[in-house]
Amino acid sequence: MAPKKKTNTEDYLRMYRQMVRIRAFEDNANQLYLSAKMPGLTHMYSGQEAVAVGICEALEDSDKITSTHRGHGHCVAKGAEFKQMFCELLGKEEGYCRGKGGSMHIADQSHGNLGANAIVGGSMGIATGAALSARRLGKKDVTVCFFGDGATAQGLWYEVMNMAALWKLPVIYACENNGYSEYTKTDEIAAGSITARAEAFGIEAHMVDGQDVLAVNDLAQKLVARARKGEGPFFIELKTYRYHGHHVGDINRDYYRSKDEESEWKKVRDPIANFGKWLESEGVVTADELVAINDEIRADAEAAVQYALDAGYPPANEVDMHVFAGVDHALAYV
Amino acid sequence: MTREITLSKAVNEAIAEEMRRDETIFLIGEDVAEAGTPFKVLSGLVEEFGTDRVIDTPIAEPGFMGIAVGAAMTGSRPIVDLMFGDFIFLVMDQLCNQAAKTHYMSGGKLSVPLVLRTNLGATRRSAAQHSQSLHALVAHIPGLKVALPSSAYEAKGLMKTAIRDDNPVVIFEDKLMYNDKAPVPEEEYLIPFGEANVMRQGRDVTLIGTSSMVQVCQKAAEILEKEGISAEVIDPRTIVPLDEETILNSVRKTSRAIVVDEGHQNFGITGEIASRISEKAFYHLDAPVQRMGAMDVPVPFSPALEDITVPTPEGVADRARLICRGELVHAA
Ligand SMILES: Cc1ncc(C[n+]2csc(CCOP(=O)(O)OP(=O)(O)O)c2C)c(N)n1
Ligand SMILES: [Mg+2]
């Protein structure tokens, strides 16, 4: 299968739109938290949009991804709709996980998203297993395992990389290095080089600017195509930045991250603004058209928020459904 | 002198006092130093004790748990901070195959004086991987002691005892209680393991509650009192060791018991305590001993579902009414 080529206007605009959709989703999610309309906490993906979009735009619907606690971006990028996402965020019946998962487990399973995960590194085995399964079943699917820089400390990663390399599995480990794990700088918790760790298993490793959607997408297309041919696994370290705190409640964070650093990234390295400027300079769109895209997506998101706020909670009798496959109600079974 | 402090502050004080007393104690875990943990329980400790004794780790739970076990076997007294009780699954081998068995396997020659402090409790809208109450899992393993503080007072006294114990001790704090205040003496005190606290005297039914469920039992007792049912409330404070005597004496008096715990009901703490009562006070019972645990489902995110998975004061009072009036046909 030839890789999709992102060389035409339509594909560029789709990437732009997808990044704006993630940002719009997150801004609304943050607002829901601040106005106490969202149960619990959530981890914002804002700032990292080019990673999820650049990679997922190189994937087919049947390709798989595994996501993280910071998973809204991956979910949108892999094809999810706002309505079911906001419903999930608010614990409503129409959410992708029927309200059982919430922010940290949000996923549109029908587009190959095997789940967001609240255990750091918890999806590394799952992604590798999906790749093994695709190969065994004669499918051409590739799996991308998203995780953060902090997750590289988990031993599980080294176990599965070893097996993925031994068995040449079609899996791509995508490390979103946003410089922090919770309230700690990556430099303080990661010894040596992260790419060298993958290389130690004979895995081809790449580093890419995670704020540049075209660079990410270009690399992803090549690696996905090669993984499909059995040349995997691969590792990508994507340098990126999260704009918000570790979670929405992490407001006073000067003690571990300066305001100057934050505003520098937002001003100079914003993946959406920079791509928009590039599209303009290449004559792909006008400034007015970009504004119109933004407005339309914002309106969409707001309508979906309202829809989700008005939507119903799951009925109480769902509480013991879906515990076991093939069992309607677990309490009557166990 | 007694003042009111939060559970969080109580834990912090206990650790600080013990660290001042004994230089071999150190703290290890994720974001324990400058951040003082996400719940801010350990704030200020790194400023006093330095990064040598308050050690931030990478997100490598089995790794730092194993390091703590080795350090404990060789003269240190580590306090391991596990951010969420749910992560205990990641450290199970080091905790249960290594720490718990070393003293036994070495014929008593080696010991593992460490504390694993972590938490339990649902209804924080954190979904299935950040809401579990997993103390039954470790209570099942011989060689591990398990403490379940139910207020700031217990949290401080039990923590100090845990730190001085020569065995691996796992302490589960209720994460919803970190900001709850309770009277705590300024003078030093320790709470011995295996001594239950009779929180309230009663005649008709014994409510045995652990951790987060102590308050639930207390509130249930208040509801019942208005209806003329007199409930005794007991907090075991540690489940390994378990103060059987206090529980049995109470049940011999009241003839009825309900055990309430936030772990899953099946194969859990409630079943263990209920069966000890049935074995040892059977002829004093007027009704089958009741178990009330968390519903046997993963903790759902949606508030509409999550709230019905955990025992409530009304639910406990309902059950008490049934057994006190002899209306219980069969246990729900
Ligand atoms: C096994 C495990 N340990 C600790 C945590 C708590 N925790 C949640 S997110 C996080 C930091 C993750 O950092 P990183 O992997 O870099 O992802 P980022 O948050 O930066 O996207 C931690 C420590 C967890 N959820 N799971
Ligand atoms: Mg990170």
Image (cartoon, grey):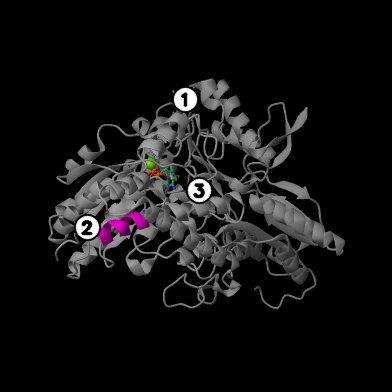
Which three-letter amino acid code belongs to the residue tagged 1?
Arg
- Sequence-wise, which precedes: disc 1 or disc 3? 1
Is A175 placed left or right of B27 in the picture? left
Q: Chain of mark 2?
A: A
The answer as to whether the residues below labels 2 and 3 share one chain is no
Q: Closer to the camera: disc 2 or disc 3? A: 2
- The residue beneath circle 3 is B85
Which region shows up in magenta?
A: A9-17
Q: Is residue A28 above or below residue B62?
A: below
Q: Closer to the camera: disc 2 or disc 1? A: 2
Specify the quadrant that holds the N terminus of chain A. Answer: bottom left
B301 in magenta: no
Q: CA distance from mark 1 to mark 3?
A: 23 Å
Give the x, y percent position of residue B99: 42, 41
Q: Are marks 2 and 3 in contact (CB under 8 Å)?
A: no
- The residue beneath circle 2 is A6
Which three-letter amino acid code belongs to the residue tagged 3?
Gly
Q: Residue at x 26, y 43 (%)?
A: A237
Label 3 CB sits under 8 Å from any ligand 1 atom: no
- The residue beneath circle 1 is B53
Q: Quadrant of ligand 1?
A: top left
